[in-house]
Amino acid sequence: MWRSLASNMFTVLVVGMFLAAGVILWGQSQYTAEGPLDQAICLRVKTGSNMGQVSKELEKTGAVSNGTIFRLGADYSDKANQLKAGSFLINERSSMEQIVEQITKGGASTCGTEIVYRIGVTRLQTQIRELDPGTERFVELAAFDPSAEDVPAVYGEKRAERDTRYRIAVAEGVTSWQIVEGLKALDLLEGNVTEVPDEGMLAPDSYEVSPGTQRGAVLAQMQEKQELRINAVWESRQDGLPLANPEEMLILASIIEKETGLAGERGQVASVFTNRLNQGMKLQTDPTVIYGITKGQGVLGRGLRRSELRRITPWNTYLIDGLPPTPIANPGLASLEAAVAPDETDYIFFVADGTGGHAFAETLQEHNRNVAKWREIEAERNNN
């Protein structure tokens, strides 16, 4: 009898072990299998949340089929205590394993709200935008001048959310003074700036920041990036350029930056100035004259007067030979690259063509025809 009972108990134990193993294998397959989510979502994990709360939220949104398996999988992989607060983009069909990895790996939000502080050539703008998980594109919620008194309520609401991300976007062609004034206008940042960095030495780019970031630290980051760019681009320069050092390259790049905003034209514009320098011709470029008037502190906001074209300043390239003494703005990487790798052309003239671009010419006769066309376009626009 006892032998029979023991045999039966052993059989039950074996069967139980096989069943348990089967359940474990089934759970593992569920944990790593493609998930049920048919459209991407933005999962917000609040500070202080745990895997149990997150699993309930994922079950409610249909991102996981079984919250218990999700929690057990996170425990088994030793990631249950690595949960990060933030907003995370959960792509369609993400497995439980992939979701756990997404919400524990770093802590940097991948969706939700982003506030972008844009420092442009003609204006400052604060843009509040939110990622649409379905399209993975940002939708603008509001945009305003950060120096304005009327600030939309949504700005304060999003600033209060801990997972909101912040970014400063600096446009190509802004001056160092404009960047410093732009940083001063941002209430997100702290610290005083006592000196304006040298013209041209701040890299136009996008910079991640957080509340309380020091303005000086942002400027230092911009300077470091620009120095790295200058050194790398100078090392890649073509032979035979009329540029003696990286400083002259930076000056030329800043002129190219201010003369055209079209990517496809930078090489041609660079070729004009390179040809002029090689032939000993004056550069005769309006943006340098404007810089001599404004010193980079704001925009002129009107056309140049004839008297200003004749005014003697160190930057008036209608009067001086060669390059001006300093850059006239902060050039982006593409303009730096154009300065050391200009297109091979015989162009020595260019003028606006009415489409946002320029008409280039090799001879003065051809250039005069292009200028006449531009004058006709200007007159027609003024009459409308």
Image (tube, rainbow, N blue to C red):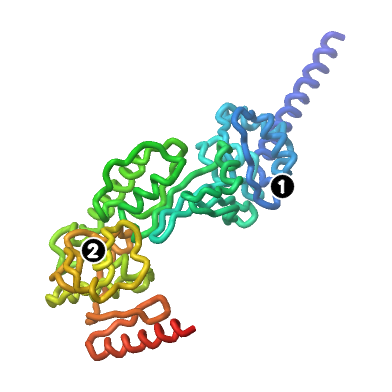
Q: In this view, does 329 lie to the left or right of 246?
A: right
- Quadrant of the rendered structure where residue 162 is? top right
Residue 229 lies, with reference to residue 70, above or below; the image says: below
Residue that protrudes farthest toward the top in the picture? 2
**Considering depth in this image, is 333 or 74 the residue closer to the camera?**
333
Quick one: label 2, few (<14), some, or many (20+) residues within 10 Å? Answer: many
Residue 363 screen position, x and y as percent:
22, 87
Q: Is residue 101 visible?
A: no
Disc marking residue 292: 2
Residue 171 lies, with reference to residue 224, above or below; the image says: below
**Considering depth in this image, is 103 or 143 the residue closer to the camera?**
143
* Residue appearing at x 82%, y 11% in the figure: 3
Q: Can residue 204 be seen in this view?
A: yes
Looking at the image, is mark 1 or mark 2 nearer the viewer? 2
Disc marking residue 36: 1
* Residue appearing at x 43%, y 58% in the figure: 123
